[in-house]
Image (tube, grey):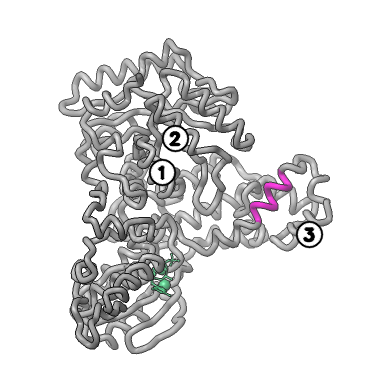
């Protein structure tokens, strides 16, 4: 059985949740969460590593005990320790943790004081007004929890793109081994790189459809066969995600790929164009009467209706068709364009890797620079650097830079924007940095007007360069905070500030529409991974996907430029 890293990570997070509800030792809880975080972003599958005999304890967050648990899980699909915990804590309680505003402590309180065990119970105590009578649960929190409950359902339906990635990779690998498969691709929202996917749409070209379908339903990760026909089938995998399969002839592969990549709106728009030209377009090809004009490749199909090839990420009917007609499509940014990462943490604050390890990995990615952005120590961030330790780090960077060839470590900090819009580092310190990455870490619940004013005031500080975490949302977990991004973009443009596209897979703040909006306003973007370990530097690809969905080109993104040009772009007037 292939157990994916995200499945192990999910179990570790469940263990941490249950331990937290039980009020266990915080260090043990943190150990599970850290390991889960590392597993989620590990570029290699744990299952493969075990097969190759890799010692799992070489991973920074995995000790002997967790390594054993992982090995058992990979063998059996279960972690007995989790099973045991589940008998001690009602399982339904951990469902409540999905509600925004409810952490393990609060879930435990609600269970003990009001015997709340599930969403229904929770709804009842809110309606009866009992919830707000509990110490620590005011009216405001009640509102937040009510709103959170509405989102839970919507969240549980869609899978994050980064979680779908390894699942799709295994699938494609499994099919590529079969000689009857000529071409195979995952179409749908996955190919358009939407930040979440509803289901997966696998397309295969072959003249042996029956064999392919049998191979499909026999895949070891299949939990349930939902439908099985001659050329199509749907299954649900153990991970919960649904997969639709279509098998077509090679002569129709391009047309089918176009159709199943969508989006639906894009399909409808091009079908209308075809109709105007008295042509018919469907998943088998483009036709004049009975004659197939094209169908083998997407490019051929687009060409028949006078369009240049449109990248999947742009196919949302947001104006891309007109640009394709005029042959004026943007040349979208690629991962290869990226020359450095401007948001990273090391062991100096809350990262897992040393400066040297981060530099080594950045060099392996062919980067020219990396900015170290530890947290500053403030009221809200206990593990941050105080000014004394920061100055020590700056000295160390000078020493390392003197030794490095064709690579530069940039001096930076993830500076906290305080409630009144001031930055929490003195000018004395700020002026020693090459750039600043500024973000809000507290008071997310201010009104939109106040939150926006707070950021604008911070941007007035001449040392403010990059506005990081611009929305504060967590995909499928936390809604963005209230902020007028349009105003912020306008101010950023005027002041020469840059907006961060945070590429942590669960964050992806900004979204695609924001990226396009920034581009139209002439505001520069930086794509940053906000890495807390070396492997997280590989998350850059997810940021690039999002940027492509927002039509960004290399020139719109500052970390595609050489160091010199980067420094020029960061300079404020
Ligand atoms: P998802 O799965 O919700 O993340 O989004 P998609 O875009 O993958 O949608 P899905 O799986 O329902 O369908 C895959 C593609 O098939 C979709 O992007 C476009 C095409 N498609 C589905 N239904 C229709 C339809 O009614 N009309 C047209 N023209 N295309 C459709
Ligand atoms: Ca889909
Ligand atoms: Ca589908």
Residue 124 tag number = 3
Q: Residue at x 54, y 32 (%)?
A: 441
Q: Measure the alpha-carbon separation of dots 2 and 1.
A: 9 Å
Name which residue lies at 36% across and 62% down: 190
Instruction: Tell me which segment is drawn in magenta.
Output: 141-149
Between the C-alphas of marks 1 and 3, the distance is 42 Å
Compared with residue 532, is residue 78 higher up or lower down, i.e. above or below? below
Ligand 1 has an atom within 8 Å of the beta carbon of the residue at disc 1: no
Q: Which residue is mark 2?
A: 489
Tell which quarter ligand 1 is in.
bottom left
Q: Earlier in the sequence, mark 2 or mark 3?
A: 3
Does the magenta portion include 142?
yes
> Alpha-carbon neighbours of circle 2 within 10 Å: few (<14), some, or many (≥20)?
many
The quadrant of the rendering that contains the N terminus is bottom left
Looking at the rendered image, the disc whose residue lies closer to the viewer, 1 or 3, is 1
The kind of secondary structure element at disc 3 is helix
In this orientation, which residue lies closer to the viewer: 382 or 253?
253
Q: Is residue 50 visible?
A: no
Q: At which x and y percent is residue 228?
A: 40, 86
- Quadrant hosting residue 136: top right
Q: Is residue 291 magenta-colored?
A: no
Residue behind mark 1: 517
């Amino acid at each position: 059985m292939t157990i994916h890293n995200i499945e192990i990570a999910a179990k570790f997070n469940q263990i941490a949740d249950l331990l937290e509800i039980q009020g266990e030792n915080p260090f043990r809880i943190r150990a599970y969460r850290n390991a889960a975080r590392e597993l989620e972003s590990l570029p290699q599958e744990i299952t493969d590593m075990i097969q190759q005999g890799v010692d799992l304890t070489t991973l920074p967050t995995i000790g002997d005990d967790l390594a054993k648990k992982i090995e058992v899980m990979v063998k059996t699909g279960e972690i007995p320790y989790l099973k045991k915990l589940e008998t001690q804590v009602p399982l339904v309680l951990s469902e409540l943790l999905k509600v925004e505003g409810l952490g393990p402590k609060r879930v435990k309180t609600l269970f003990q004081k009001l015997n709340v065990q599930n969403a229904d119970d929770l709804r009842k105590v809110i309606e009866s007004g009992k919830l707000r009578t509990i110490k620590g649960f005011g009216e405001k929190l009640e509102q937040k929890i009510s709103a959170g409950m509405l989102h839970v359902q919507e969240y549980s339906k869609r899978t994050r793109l980064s979680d779908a990635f390894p699942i799709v990779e295994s699938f494609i690998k499994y099919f590529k081994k079969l000689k009857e498969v000529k071409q195979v691709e995952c179409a749908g929202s996955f190919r358009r790189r939407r930040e979440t996917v509803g289901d997966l749409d696998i397309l295969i070209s072959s003249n042996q459809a029956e064999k392919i379908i049998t191979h499909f339903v026999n895949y070891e990760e299949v939990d349930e066969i939902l439908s099985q026909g001659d050329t199509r089938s749907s299954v649900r995998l153990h991970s919960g995600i649904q997969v639709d399969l279509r098998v077509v002839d090679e002569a129709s592969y391009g047309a089918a790929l176009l159709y199943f990549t969508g989006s639906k709106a894009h399909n409808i728009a091009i079908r209308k164009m075809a109709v105007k030209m008295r042509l018919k377009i469907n998943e088998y090809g483009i036709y004049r009467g009975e004659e197939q004009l094209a169908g083998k490749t997407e490019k051929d199909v687009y060409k028949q209706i006078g369009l240049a090839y449109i990248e999947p990420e742009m196919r949302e009917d947001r104006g891309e068709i007109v640009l394709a007609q005029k042959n004026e499509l943007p040349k979208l940014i690629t991962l290869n364009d990226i020359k450095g990462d401007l948001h990273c943490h090391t062991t100096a604050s809350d990262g897992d890797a040393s400066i040297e390890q981060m530099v080594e990995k950045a060099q392996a990615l062919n980067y020219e620079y990396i900015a170290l952005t530890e947290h500053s120590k403030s009221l809200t961030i206990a593990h941050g650097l105080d000014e004394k330790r920061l100055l020590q780090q700056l000295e160390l960077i000078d020493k390392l830079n003197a030794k490095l060839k064709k690579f530069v470590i940039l001096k930076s900090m993830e500076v906290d924007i305080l409630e009144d819009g001031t930055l929490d580092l003195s000018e004395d310190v700020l002026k020693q940095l090459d750039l600043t990455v500024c973000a809000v870490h507290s008071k997310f619940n201010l009104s939109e007007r106040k939150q926006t004013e707070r950021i604008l005031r911070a941007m007035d500080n001449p040392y403010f360069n990059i506005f990081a975490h611009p929305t504060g949302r967590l995909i499928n977990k936390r809604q963005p905070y209230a902020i007028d991004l349009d105003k912020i973009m306008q101010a950023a443009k005027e002041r020469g500030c840059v907006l961060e596209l945070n590429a942590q897979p669960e964050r992806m703040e900004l979204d695609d529409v924001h990226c396009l909006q920034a581009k139209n306003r002439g505001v520069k973007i930086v794509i940053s991974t906000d890495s807390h370990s070396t492997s997280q530097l590989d998350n850059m690809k997810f940021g690039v996907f999002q940027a492509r969905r927002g039509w960004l080109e290399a020139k719109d993104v500052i970390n595609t430029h050489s160091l010199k040009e980067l420094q020029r772009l960061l300079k404020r007037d």
